[in-house]
Image (spheres, grey):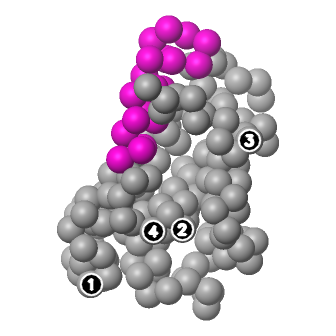
Amino acid sequence: MEPRFNMMENEVGARFAKRFAAASMVIAQSTLPTSTQELVSLRASQINGCGWCIDFHTKEAAAHGESALRLNLVAAWRESTVFSEAEQAALAFAEEGTRLADAYQGVSDETWAQVRKYYDDNQVAALVAAVALINAANRMAVLVHQQGGSYEVGMFANLTAN
């Protein structure tokens, strides 16, 4: 499968990417732990089958010190012992927020209560934004057949400059 379109080589696509990256910086600069941000992004990307985003978030998480064991177990986090209760709440939130069509209410009251138990208001806002943003990124990458395997850590740092 070949990529259909390169958003970065298009004027509108590049302008959008710059603003998309700026939105991601709000999340990155929040108090939501970086490891949680990356685990949530990785899990949503797995569900959506986005090879590019899986590549991106696996490499970024590793660069921030995430272990191979934990990265390998994200897809089976419920059957794993390596994630904290707070991370489990965030992963459940990511799954339910990604699989909106699977439940009429979206995120369950139980999952919401778990998220609120472990995260303050600013972290909840960042978590909501992270799930929304990664789902948008997944859809863009899948629509244009952007394949995983070529991402290099920090390759989009220039998008957030200025």
> If the image is split into quadrants, where does the C terminus sit?
top left
Label 4: which residue?
Answer: 33
Instruction: Check residue 32 for magenta coloring.
Output: no
- The 10 Å Cα crowd at callout 2, few under 14, some 14 to 19, many 20 or more, is some
Report the residue at 57% width, 19% height from top.
7
Q: Establish if 125 lies above or below 79.
A: above
Residue at which label 2 appears: 35
Q: Of the two numbered discs 3 and 1 on the same chain, state the one appearing first in sequence.
A: 1
The tag on residue 117 is 1
What amino acid type is highlighted by mark number 2?
Ser
Mark 3 vs 4: CB contact within 8 A: no
**For numbered disc 3, what is the local secondary structure?**
loop
The residue segment tinted magenta is 8-26
Identity of the amino acid at label 4?
A: Pro
Q: Is residue 12 above or below residue 52?
A: above
How far apart are labels 3 and 1 at the CA level?
A: 35 Å
User: In the rendering, at what x and y percent does residue 127 appear?
Assistant: 35, 61
Q: Quadrant of residue 15?
A: top left
